[in-house]
Every structure is written in structure tokens, then in C-alpha cells.
Image (cartoon, rainbow, N blue to C red):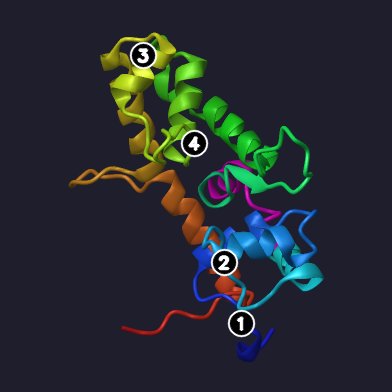
């Protein structure tokens, strides 16, 4: 793949494009609508079978990544819901994205060790993981507050807050002298190196 064929300006665009392209989107209708709405990364005009092929090639580059890294990337860049044009009367125009939900399930189980020696509710962890990666929004599209989540899970606010802090430290990292790099940053750096090396994403310009 030479420089003239590079279709993505950033790894974020490439991953969002790949994880948003479903097998039912070979025709431009639902995918085109999503692209025009700015919900997915763009591949500089790729639609239909060409778009699906490009998405598959990007996904193939991540095949050898650990399940943790893949789950982190899917949870971050895949949409919570996918467009649906089944035309059924009960259809809202969207359907749950099973791939995103599976990634969240894995991350919920994986982060159990963060709470070793303490009682930890699976429901609370999953709710917080979903919230962090774009789920559990209110009618205005904003994240639900810690107070609201405590009410929904019927758990004391301080317990919810403590869980939230531990999960955010793991996913985002911590600052300060003894700060640690977050798991998301580690996974994204690996994807960035891989996709730039294989020519899917343009090389970074020197400062």
C-alpha cells in the first residue's frame, strides 16, 4: 500500500470506520446516513463492498492483538448501536451492537481483579464500564451522574464513586510522579503503530 492509497488521517478514524462497518452495510443507505451524520470515521469516500473490504483489512491487522486490547479498542471506537432499516413497526431505526456489548462484557469481567478483597457488584461494574464507553446516557445524550447510577443500582453513592475512580484509573491512567499509563492508551498506541506501519494511516509529521 503506497502513500497515494492511504485513506485515513488518524488511527481514530481508521478504527471508528472499521468497527462501524457491519456486514449488512454493503449498500450505501444506512452507512452513508451514519457517515453524513459524523458518527463514524470516514475512509475518504469508501462505501459498499470497497468499504467493507477496507474495514476487514483493518480488522485483520488487529487479529493477533490480545483479547484485552481488542476489547478496549472495540469499546472505545465501535458504536453502541448500529443503523437498522428492517422497517418493522417496532424498530427505532437502531439495533444494539453485539460486538460492542461483548467487549464491555469482557472488560467487566477482566476488571474484577481491581476490587480483590472487596465486595464488588457485577451490575455496578458493567454499568460504569458501559457509561465510560458511551452507554447509559440520559435523554439529552449526556452521561448519567454518579448519583443517578447509585439510585439505579441501589448502591451507596460512595461505593459507586470508589468503583468509578478505580475503573477510570485503570482505563485512563493516573497523573503525578508515580502516574501510570491507562490501558486504553496502551491499546491505542499498539494499534497506531500497527496501522501506520502497514500503511493504513499516514505517518506522523515531525515536529
Vertical relation: 16 (above or below) 135: below
Mark positioned earlier in the residue sequence (1 or 4): 1
Quarter-of-image position of residue 168: top left
Q: CA distance from mark 2 to mark 3?
A: 37 Å
Q: Find the magenta span and give its range.
A: 61-74
The residue that disc 4 covers is 135
Residue shown at 51%/17% (left/top)? 122
Q: Residue furthest bottom?
A: 4
Mark 4 or mark 2: which is in front? 2
| Residue annotated with mark 2 | 36
Q: Residues within 10 Å of mark 2 (few under 14, many from 20)?
A: few
Residue 190 point in image, percent of width and height: 52, 59
Closest to the observer, 36 or 167 = 36
Q: Earlier in the sequence, mark 4 or mark 2?
A: 2
Quarter holding the N terminus is: bottom right
In this rendering, the answer to whether 129 lies above or below 44 is above
Q: Which residue is mark 1?
A: 6
Q: Is residue 207 left or right of residue 152?
A: left
Tell us which disc is closer to us: 1 or 2: 2
Q: Identify the secondary structure beneath mark 1.
A: loop
Secondary structure mainly formed by the magenta segment? helix
The stretch drawn in magenta includes residue 187? no
Q: Earlier in the sequence, mark 3 or mark 1?
A: 1
Mark 3 residue element: helix
User: According to the image, label 3 marks what residue?
Assistant: 151
Q: Give left or right: position of 146 versus 126.
A: left
Is residue 59 visible in the rendered structure shown here?
no
Mark 2 residue element: helix
Mark 2 against mark 3, which lies toward the viewer?
2
Q: How many marks?
A: 4
Please state the horizontal and vertical placement of residue 133, each as a whole percent of the image: 47, 41
Q: CA distance from mark 3 to mark 4?
A: 17 Å
Amino acid at each position: 500500500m503506497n502513500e497515494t492509497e492511504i485513506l485515513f488521517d488518524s488511527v481514530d478514524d481508521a478504527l471508528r470506520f472499521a468497527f462501524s462497518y457491519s456486514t449488512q452495510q454493503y449498500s450505501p443507505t444506512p452507512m452513508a446516513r451514519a457517515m453524513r451524520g459524523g458518527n463514524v470515521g470516514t475512509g475518504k469516500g469508501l462505501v459498499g463492498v470497497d468499504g467493507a473490504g477496507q474495514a476487514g483489512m483493518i480488522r485483520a491487522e488487529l487479529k493477533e492483538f490480545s483479547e484485552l486490547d481488542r476489547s478496549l479498542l472495540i469499546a472505545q471506537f465501535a458504536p453502541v448501536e448500529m443503523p437498522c432499516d428492517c422497517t418493522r413497526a417496532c424498530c427505532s431505526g437502531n439495533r444494539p451492537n453485539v460486538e460492542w456489548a461483548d467487549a464491555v462484557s469482557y472488560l467487566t469481567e477482566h476488571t474484577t481483579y481491581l476490587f480483590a478483597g472487596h465486595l464488588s457488584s457485577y451490575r455496578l461494574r458493567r454499568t460504569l464500564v458501559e457509561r465510560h464507553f458511551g452507554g447509559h446516557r440520559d435523554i439529552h445524550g449526556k452521561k448519567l451522574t454518579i448519583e443517578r447510577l447509585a439510585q439505579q443500582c441501589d448502591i451507596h453513592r460512595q461505593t459507586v464513586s470508589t468503583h468509578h475512580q478505580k475503573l477510570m484509573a485503570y482505563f485512563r491512567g493516573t497523573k503525578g510522579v508515580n502516574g501510570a499509563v491507562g490501558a486504553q492508551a496502551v491499546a491505542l498506541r499498539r494499534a497506531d503503530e500497527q496501522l501506520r506501519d502497514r500503511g493504513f494511516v499516514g505517518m506522523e509529521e515531525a515536529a
